[in-house]
Amino acid sequence: MSKNMMSKNMMSKNETSVSRRGFLRNAVKGSAAAAAAACTTMVAAPPEANALVRPPKPLPPDAVGLLYDSTLCIGCKACVTACKEVNHMPPDVGPAQQGWNAGGGDKPIYDSPVELSARTLNVIKAYSHGTGATKDAAENGFAFIKRQCLHCADPSCVSVCPVSAMTKDTRTGIVNHDPSACIGCRYCVLSCPFGVPKYDYNDAFGEIKKCQLCKQQLAKNELPGCADVCPTGATLFGRTEDLKAEAKRRTALKVGEHAHFPRGDIAGKVGGPRDGHEKLVEAAYQPHIYGEKELGGTQCLAVSAVPFDKLNLPTNVPENGYPTLSEGIQHTLYAGMIAPATVFAGLAYLAHRNTKNHTDE
Amino acid sequence: MPDGHVDLDAEHIGDLDEYEGALAGLSRREFLTYCTGVAATLGLSPAFGVKIANAAVAAPRPTVIWLSGQACTGCTESLLRTHHPSLETLILDTISLDYNETLMTGSGHQAENWKQQAMKDNWGKYLMVTDGSIPTKDGGVYCKVASKTYKDAVLECAKGAAAVISMGSCSSWGGWPSTGVNPTGAVGLNEIIKDKPVVSVPGCPPNPYNFLSLVLHFVAFGKLPELDDKMRPKFAYGRLIHENCERRPHFDAGRFAMEFGDYGHRQGYCLYKLGCKGPETYANCPSVGFNDVGQGTWPVGTGHPCFGCTEKGVGFTKGIHELASLKSVAPPNSYPAVAVDKGEGMSAGAAAVVAGIAGAAVGAGAVISSRLGKQDAKTESSSTAAE
Amino acid sequence: MSSQAHEHQPLGGRVLTLPFLICAALVAVAGVILFQRYTQGLAAASNLNDGYPWGIWVAIDVVIGSAFGCAGYVIALLCYILNRGEYHPLVRPAVLASLFGYGLAGLAVLVDLGRYWNFYHMMLPWYAQPNSVMLEVGLCVATYTLVLVVEFAPAFLERFGIEGLRAKLNKVLWVFIALGVLLPTMHQSSLGTMMVIVGHKLSPLWQSQMLPVFFLLTAILMGFAIVVWESVMASLNFRRPMETPVLSKLAGLMLVVASLFVVLRFVDLIVRGQIGQIFGGPQSGWFVVEMVLMISGLALLIPKANRNRSRALFLSASLLLAAGILYRLNVYLIGFTPAVGPWHYFPSVKEIMVTVGVFALEIALYLLFVKKLPVMHAVHPEHG
């Protein structure tokens, strides 16, 4: 009965619809098989043979960064304070301190960040287990970890930013953020595998904030705030290649050995030469340099005596950055916009032909 | 008294009033104030001051035999510098210090005989105190008194001691004589006396009030105060210097003196970078101070980094300007944990709203589908009817 | 032309009905909350945080909302590209639903954007960052919304009698139809690609290089399901006859797409070696619910007779829609674990009310448009 209400157009096409339906069904079946095959090749192929994977990016030639040595860190938080001063960041109040430290609104009396935030670019956090008696022990011990931007060789935040607000310096490799370009989509916040860029949700005109390796200080040939004040050289500035070599030297040290630990800039250039200090190696280093291989490598590295997963850093991660995967897909599908253009041509042809039929009626 | 305060004049104190000379020229009130101060050092309530005062004047006074080994006599010297009241008067009258090479007037055979007599008379009851380390190399020849090696003297005396106290770092773990190549094989008392607990009051010198408090605790309660794993009284060695240091806020704020006499040093900044061992040294120096001249009279207070004299493996072992390694972090909640809970979970209101929306969707779906079911039935019956 | 003019007609009737007023009230509530959001920041109106920078305003309003808006896409695909004229009666309501779906998704983006005043930077070539999936999605969605406006324009022009312009537009409409099919294909698949970069933070049950394929499939599936839903709701609420014969054909296509989705999903899990995650992985419960919804939805359509029963059609469409919603929610929120946690997120009441407001606005506008503009296919008097 309701057939009557259909357009004549449909009635006239009834004869052909069987073969058409058959075609459609076959097309769907065929595309299902093709898709299944594509799926198999897509996800099972080794990365180098996989068309959907973009090759990883190397470190820039003059990549600079920081080496954080958890065994040297004494948790004095001088770096946290210096970072705030150098970058003109406001104090941050952790949730546990809200009750007494809020200071009646925006003026807390004590800076007590618990995590990186739009007010904190650098924070020292403590791992603690059992009695927490021994420094740098995973069992019944404690250890510190410095959280800040690691300045990836292949940063996700730069790859996802739609408006080029997040950029990676081609020479120094520092990942910069330009709030005047930013639209506040927070895709960088979502995508960062290390949870670094942060947005200020309490500000109607909030900005994304992240460590930019004190590029304003480096421009004056001064050290980044954290490396400048670190009393033990736990935070050491330098070229990433030099820092990697230094990290390798440290991870090879044996317990009971006396070793020299530099402070400031490992090359003694930025911020002028500084005295290092001798120290007994009291805890065995993990034979792993965090950031050497993780997700395509990072310019800021870390060594520790406690396994990095205990320090709540992502450890079970691939050796290539995630942009190699997402950009792989995008570059394959949209290379030179050829595929979309071809599809558009086909669609336009069909639409043109078919709408003509329709209006002809 | 409910608030812990004691009316000092009202309490009856043993034979105090009859005990001529016991107060060494102190008034009764002054004496009680002193004992209450001792109680405070021990972390006890003021009411215990009376008990201590009672014990201090009870007769017979406990015998103390004090032996000295390889030492600089600094420990004894520092004891002499307590001023409220002057220690010598009190200690000589409160306890019976029967042998102390620095303080006794006798010498030679007379002194040695007196020691033997005191040991015999008080066998099993006397307190043995030593300062100075014990040489063990070459049969212990490096320190002899009355043609006996110090080691033998110590062993002999310890046999009849009710309690053994090692005063100062040398006696506690070898101190400066054991440093470097340790030419005399100097060791602490606890390595010689194995059958008795050796209570240790390390320091170079130790704070005399820690010693006084320990002794008076023993006298007053007949037992030792709570000790840590290194046999040190917890009331004095329970906390790191770093925890009570008056310069701690500078550490927390990252303000460090970079070299002696620089701006930061003159401003009283933290001495960590100059090698202060406060973060790895357990002692109450910052809270008790020395020489009874007021706050700030301790090494860090006067601008010198702590060198860890109370701590085996730190004092006389680490270089003075070598950086301290952290023993613990305090207060422990001042560091965020690596995994802090962040963000807001489900609120009751939000859960209710979501449940409401879900319920409404399912309900509407049910209503619609039942209406459609009826419509279907109608359609199907009408189409069968048409056929 | 004249025949077409009678093909569609406004439904007429009162505008200020109870459902319309309820929707308007919900929109007003959302408006008040949005005032707070714009004066005090995102935290004043939402539980968004740095672990979950994207909450339901993205996952539901944009990602799921735009899938609701795929009705116009799938119908245009069927009607104009595959030349299945029988779907023609569904085109206008579907395009209208899409217009609102996408228009309001765009609106929701402006609510969610932290620095919305810079929004136009997306359109400026010197800001463009071609590697960004977000850029592609943003430009695509914006363009597609314009395309939908053009696709819907005939209804306006017809209503206000601007026939000259309408004739001109008809001549070039094929360009917009082609774009209207190309653009959703691009951005709906890219909505999946968007989450590829979060890597290990998305549970291996969902994280895959196949995400774009799955998002495209769910977009098509949800588009179909929305067409069925809309048709059912229209026939019930406006007392119109059911378009069951057309819908039963759609149902066949839904069955094919849903089956393809389920099969590919399992193939993908097996190939990636993550099939074991189904059993007791942290988020496996949600995977199971998603699959049960999807499979029960498609199972209802397997008996051919069911495809002619409006109740079975409706139930199946609802289940498949729910499955699609849950799949997208799983990828964007439930299966997502932020780095350096633990982080918590559950939308606040205010946040939910904004989302409700957005959908309420969609419904209110839809009700208004179908009553005042020639959207619905004309029903011949003998059936009225």
Image (cartoon, coloured by chain):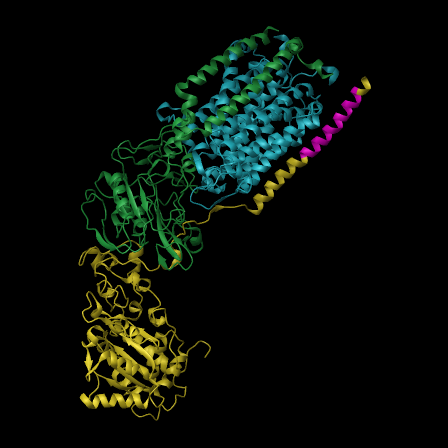
- Indicate the colour of chain C: cyan
Residue B175: x and y in percent read 24, 70
- Nearest the eye: A341 or A244: A244
Regarding residue C16, the answer to whether it shows in the image is: no
Regarding residue A94, the answer to whether it shows in the image is: yes
Which chain did the renderer colour yellow?
B
**Overall secondary structure of the magenta section:** helix
Residue B98 drawn in magenta = no
Image quarter (top left, top right, bottom left or bottom right) of the N terminus of chain C:
top right
- Nearest the eye: C292 or C144: C292
Residue B380 drawn in magenta = yes
Q: Residue at x 34, y 51 (%)?
A: A305
Image quarter (top left, top right, bottom left or bottom right) of the C terminus of chain C:
top right
Residue B201 picture quarter: bottom left
**Segment colored magenta:** B364-383
Q: Residue at x 57, y 26 (%)?
A: C260
Q: Is residue B69 above or below residue C17?
A: below
- Nearest the eye: A244 or C182: A244
Q: Is residue B176 above or below residue B91?
A: above
Residue A28: x and y in percent read 57, 19
Residue B343: x and y in percent read 47, 45
- Indicate the colour of chain A: green
Residue B320: x and y in percent read 21, 61
